[in-house]
Amino acid sequence: MGAMNRRDLMKMGAGAMASGLAAAGPAAGLVRASEESVKQWGIFEVAAQGPDSGNPFVDVSFGARFTIGHRTVEAAGFYDGNGTYKVRFSPDTAGTWSYQTTGSASELAGKTGTFDCVPARAGNHGPVGTAHQFHFEHADGTPYFPFGTTCYSYGFIGAPLDAETLANLKAAGFNKVRMCLLPKPLGKRQPAAMPFERIGGAQPPQAEDLSDSSTSSERFDLTRLNPAYFQHVEERIRDLMSAEIQADVILFHPYDAWGFKAMGAEADDRYLRYAVARLSAYRNVWWSIANEYDLVKSKSMADWDRFFRIVEESDPHGRLRSIHHSRVPYDNAKPWCTHASLQEFDFDKSAERQAAWNKPIIYDEIQYEGNIARRWGNLTAEEMTRRFWQAVIYGTYATHGETYMTDEGQPVWSDAGALQGTSAARILFLRKLLEDSGTTGLMAAENPYYPNAGNPDRLILYYFDYHRPAEYEFPLPDGGNYTATLIDPWAMTKTAVAGTFNGKSKITLPGRPYLAMLFEKAAG
Amino acid sequence: MGAMNRRDLMKMGAGAMASGLAAAGPAAGLVRASEESVKQWGIFEVAAQGPDSGNPFVDVSFGARFTIGHRTVEAAGFYDGNGTYKVRFSPDTAGTWSYQTTGSASELAGKTGTFDCVPARAGNHGPVGTAHQFHFEHADGTPYFPFGTTCYSYGFIGAPLDAETLANLKAAGFNKVRMCLLPKPLGKRQPAAMPFERIGGAQPPQAEDLSDSSTSSERFDLTRLNPAYFQHVEERIRDLMSAEIQADVILFHPYDAWGFKAMGAEADDRYLRYAVARLSAYRNVWWSIANEYDLVKSKSMADWDRFFRIVEESDPHGRLRSIHHSRVPYDNAKPWCTHASLQEFDFDKSAERQAAWNKPIIYDEIQYEGNIARRWGNLTAEEMTRRFWQAVIYGTYATHGETYMTDEGQPVWSDAGALQGTSAARILFLRKLLEDSGTTGLMAAENPYYPNAGNPDRLILYYFDYHRPAEYEFPLPDGGNYTATLIDPWAMTKTAVAGTFNGKSKITLPGRPYLAMLFEKAAG
């Protein structure tokens, strides 16, 4: 796959054709910019021809300043191969923006132009940020409830598995996916491309059967990134954006056969800046500094902190930033971390974590539905469903993953491919329940007798987990006048309880565990 | 009920008529002793007539020294009403014992006699002590696996509920029961008697409906214990002994309407010494210094430590001693504590607890099977069964309790009465599995991939809890040559797996959670 053509660029604009990019702009020939008009939260791109000799990744800089009124945003560009340099910007404000390029080569610097940013199409709510202390919302104020999954290899596994994965993501209703930017070993399967230039030719030297503990015979020039690799992953992120699925892009990870987890600081930092310059204009991008960072033994805590700061400083769009641990939690109170991305399932510790970090918490690994022998990979769908409800009732979020055994050579869902499990439908049921409730995110009750969460002026949601009282006197606020709906999270049923409720309200319950009760403030 | 008659005394001897007690012995008239022969671990009693004026509980002392060969054991006596003083001794060694009484009144002191201790009947394994670091065994070396329940009010609830409770305990197959020595409020029901003399008459002044948070209008003379009350409880303990059920006697508790939880040190200590003098000769007695000690706000840690030391020093039989907490764990490393009696169900912390205390652990409250509204009281039978298996697989033990809603005025099982639940049968299944295995107590594997416990030269037991790998390569010891049995703890089935296994052994599993696998070393 080569550099983006005009049609590719048009796809980038918030899914709306009118915000596409085109070879047009003030500078003829060597510099092309997208059309004079771009939609809010779409992508405006300036491409320029520059040096293609030496090492453009190391020797040449390119970027632009984007200005509206008194506000100026600087964005770094990136080299896309074949002498083409690009800089991208996703405007958050409607109006007329101007830009001026900067660059270490004369043909790249000092180019200027303007474009109009017009309001987004209906249904585009903009990028996701944190809101209401422990929650998320889109830039237009629409609540966002992360109900994501994990497909680590989706970005680089190649056709047809990537398209199948996307179709399955859409069908299952997940609105976020955790995906690695650097490749993982795929057994006998080769990644669609490699992120750095091969030493000794573009093709792998031999067919290798690689696992996380393998060492490939391939060698790479870590000073030269491979634009084709990143173009490929980028296309996957763009497809996710079109499907309104957030891409939680994992920048480093320990599952590696090629040495990419131990490249050294210079190559690490160059790669990071490249990824941010290239991808941050996509409004669905989140940065996950690493997966299981503490399993990457070649890096220190100072490295992880530096990566956070590089991403924070070099990302003109301020996308969300987190880091995912295995056993040693990161200090999520650090200022560059926007939310916690945990590997835990002791949800009852959420209140102390929220107090310590004062940020949203996503339990990004709560083990996997499946049947493999690894102890983290064989939850029942019922247990996965239970854990999602626990997360929500403690005012936090969870992420799905699935590891059912597959036919020889086929990936499990946590890498890419086909879903086999039955928790996804229940997770979507819970997501819809929250989205339909009109709430902005549930706040966990403080020291409740039974865990519950909500916004008492709108709704209160109880989840009884393994408890099954035959009746319970719910301590509702006085003067609330609530309706009550019994919810079976597994059967996905909602049953109205007759009457309205106010203050202490005793309600007979079915005597089965794993049920929920939703109280909603009645109108008037 | 009055002082014990000959027939009562005969019942005391290990359930065997030949070891009964009788009015016989060297001193005529005022002093009577049991027959010249008593079975090992039975009870030899010396009764003497002494002062019945003043306050015998405060003013008079009585006791005896029991001697065999060069060994002498001192036992304190107790006042049993009507001028009768008694001292009891349960000999642990066969042979001829002599005794000499001591007392502050001339008619009590200096009486002497001898008796023969003959071997116990077959099937009487003697009292239970700790063994093998984290486990228990009877005095004759027979392993004892505590699979108990909780009937707090069994000792004082009175007929016919006490007999029903005993019948239900036997039918369910529990081999230990936690029971309070001091009364708990029973609603409108009155305890069979009260442990201290009433001020203003023997009958309660009015019908009261008492709960744990009530304050009774009754007043008591805390310097005068009521022998009838203790005779009544003692009869319950004797019935348990006949049924081979250990009586985990709870000496203090916070559920009180009469002020017994805040009597002051002098009355506390007098009551303790009385209880020990009276009951410790029963070979099935264990001392639980308190239930939920940390909820008794009137006592300090120094008080609890003192109670332990009083019991330790005054009990000539050295019965087991523990204390049960609610939220603040006791320092079970203290030397007077023989084992930990916890209220927790985070069994995966057992290894660190064992390392800290180096003693057996019984999770004596793991919540209750039932359906009441209290969050500790509505487990499913499946969840209760699961928790017992978790306890065992971490090399520890658990205690059952049940709180199903009952008809008005009827106690729930955790006080006394009728079992409604369905976990008891599964608990008995697990107990029989251990007893039939010939093991001395399972040692938890250190840092296992999946928790398992056993004695590798005899058996290894896995419990997969919520995990359900479709197949698993069990890391069995090399050279073991084990048979494998798949166990369904809920269905109570055992299914032999074809073949024998040795070293790493991959076995296909049913793909359902909550299953166990027992490996037993094949003969030869």
Image: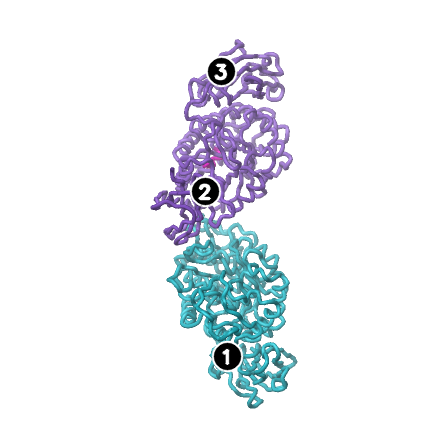
Chain colours: A purple, B cyan
Q: Does residue A53 lie above or below B52 as drawn?
A: above
Instruction: Check disc 1 and report its element: helix, strand or loop.
Output: loop
Q: Secondary structure at mark 3?
A: strand
Q: Chain of mark 1?
A: B
* Camera-nearest residue between B158 and B282: B158
For the residues beneath circles 1 and 3, the answer to whether they share a chain is no
**Magenta stretch: includes residue A437:** no
The residue lying toward the viewer, choosing from A482 and A343, is A482
Answer with left or right where residue A408 lies relative to residue B66: left
Same chain shared by disc 3 and disc 2: yes
Question: Identity of the amino acid at label 3?
Answer: Asp
Image location of residue A7, percent across then percent down: 44, 18
x, y percentage for residue A471? 39, 53
Q: Can you identify the residue that label 3 sits on?
A: A116
Magenta part of the protein: which range? A146-153
Residue A388: mark: 2
State left or right for residue B66 relative to residue A23: right
Q: Which residue is mark 1?
A: B13
Give the mark nearest the N terminus, 3 or 2.
3
Q: Amino acid at mark 2?
A: Phe
Which residue is pictured at 58% across the width and 34% down the height?
A337
Q: Residue furthest bottom?
A: B28
